[in-house]
Image (spheres, rainbow, N blue to C red):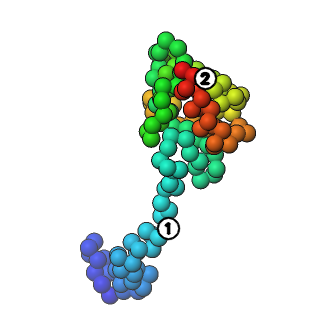
Amino acid sequence: MIINSCGRLRNVIFCPRYSNLNAMSKKSKLKTNASKVTPPAPKEEDSAVFLDRSNNILIQVLAKPGAKQNGITGITTEGVGVQINAPPSEGEANAELVKYMASVLGLRKSDVVFDKGFKSRSKTLKIVGNITLDEVKKKISEEIESS
């Protein structure tokens, strides 16, 4: 018998401190938990246009609302710079961004959806339409050159 911190008598068999269930050391517990954690999928060359684990095309966008006209300003490792001719209030710029990116890629508006960043300037768009990664990169590059 053992007296616990509350002053009650406890049987040794039921005490978690002396139980065989908790016989594993803290280091071995950490090792088993660490092996279950999967590292994030590497982006292709750390570009702004890449495939996720489910082979969906993702585009990181750095939105610049309130511009005079819609256009792609450039592409960096952080994202595709897109200026939008809509104010950043009540989701107007987001709707215009989806509409513009769909027209650049030659897709329907329903084929371009938000993945992250609905309220941020740094956004991630998911392309669910029938288009390849190389075609997306090519069309974005063509839009940059035509601007």
Which residue shows up at 61% across the image and 23% down it? 100
Q: Secondary structure at mark 1?
A: helix
Q: Is residue 37 above or below residue 80?
A: below
Quick one: 141 or 53, which is closer to the camera? Answer: 141
- Seen as rendered, the residue at the extreme top is 68
Relative to 49, 18 lies left or right: left
**What kind of residue is marked 2?**
Tyr
Instruction: Bin the neighbour count of mark 1 within 10 Å (Cα to Cα): few under 14, some 14-19, many 20 and up.
Output: few
Relative to 59, 66 lies left or right: left
Quick one: 52 or 37, which is closer to the camera? Answer: 52
Give the residue number, with chain letter if any, for mark 1: 36
- Quarter where residue 1 is shown: bottom left
Instruction: Bin the neighbour count of mark 2 within 10 Å (Cα to Cα): few under 14, some 14-19, many 20 and up.
Output: many
Q: Secondary structure at mark 2?
A: helix
- Please indicate, yes or no, whether residue 141 appears anywhere in the rendered image: yes
Sequence-wise, which precedes: disc 2 or disc 1?
Answer: 1
Q: Is residue 53 above or below residue 136?
A: below
Q: Is residue 127 above or below residue 28?
A: above
Position of residue 81 measured from the top left corner of the image (x, y, whole percent): 47, 29
Position of residue 91 measured from the top left corner of the image (x, y, whole percent): 53, 21
Which residue shows up at 54% across the image and 20% down it? 147
Position of residue 8 measured from the top left corner of the image (x, y, whole percent): 30, 76
**What kind of residue is marked 1?**
Lys
- Please indicate, yes or no, whether residue 95 appears anywhere in the rendered image: no
Give the residue number, with chain letter if any, for mark 2: 100
Q: Is residue 98 above or below residue 130?
A: above
Quick one: 30 or 43, which is closer to the camera? Answer: 43
